[in-house]
Image: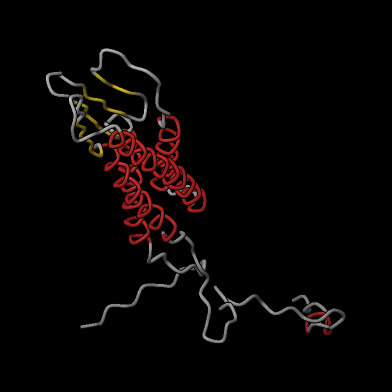
Amino acid sequence: MASPRPPAPDPTGARPDTGGRRRGSLGLVAALLLLLAAGLTAFASFQPLFTGRISTPGQPGFELSITAWGVNTDAPQQEGGVPTNGLPLSVAAGLLAGAAVLTLLAVSRRAAGLFAAIGTAFLAGAGWVVFMQVLSWIDTFRSSENGGGAFRIDTSTSIGLGTWLLGGALVLALAGTVVALRTPKARSEAVTPRYGFPAPVGPPPPSQPPPGAWSPAERHGPPPAH
């Protein structure tokens, strides 16, 4: 029984891309992480970043909830306002979604990584601003609280769901950016021997006589006619 012959080498001299499956799986993971980060950022912008309640004895009190787009409160009167963070969060979500599409289509690893890094930077900056604002709101509520007297004021504060979701989105964005930048490129390499010189592909070209040399046919002339 004859043993099977090995497959013939590629006549183009190209080496098959053995990392295609790994590249595709890494690109899919990066795209999913970035897409989840974008969706979570957009969803978190509509959730409460901070919630506080003020109550006094014999009074119903009121509750205040702050999102990235404004203030929701059941107080009879609302004075002042808060800075909105919806626009930078929307920009960050859009950049992360664009990076996810570029990573999934495998158009350019550099462009996908750049979009992901910029989106992550936007998200990190906006998240830091939100965190500092939440700390300021907590301090403002606690400063209005007193423990005794006829006009006692009790306050309760909590960090809203939106703030925690932004933290989770930032973790996903960082992981997606790292995976997107580590996704290998698709390339085809020529076969190279151990000494570093490209291996010849195909049959060698026919040798040509040097210029000015006489070939045997020219030296003896054409064959005699019979």
Hey, which quadrant is residue 105 in on the image? top left
Q: Is residue 119 left or right of residue 196?
A: left
Q: Residue furthest right?
A: 212
The image shows residue 166 at horizontal and vertical percentages of 32, 42
The image shows residue 118 at horizontal and vertical percentages of 49, 46
Q: Is residue 223 left or right of residue 63?
A: right
The image shows residue 91 at horizontal and vertical percentages of 45, 35
Q: Residue at x 41, y 64 (%)?
A: 17
Q: Residue furthest bottom?
A: 195
Relative to residue 13, is residue 37 depicted above or below? Answer: above
Hey, which quadrant is residue 217 in on the image? bottom right
Quarter of the picture containing the N terminus is bottom left
The image shows residue 64 at horizontal and vertical percentages of 26, 25
Q: Residue at x 38, y 53 (%)?
A: 174
Q: Is residue 71 left or right of residue 56?
A: right
Relative to residue 83, is residue 210 depicted above or below? Answer: below
Q: Is residue 188 left or right of residue 51?
A: right
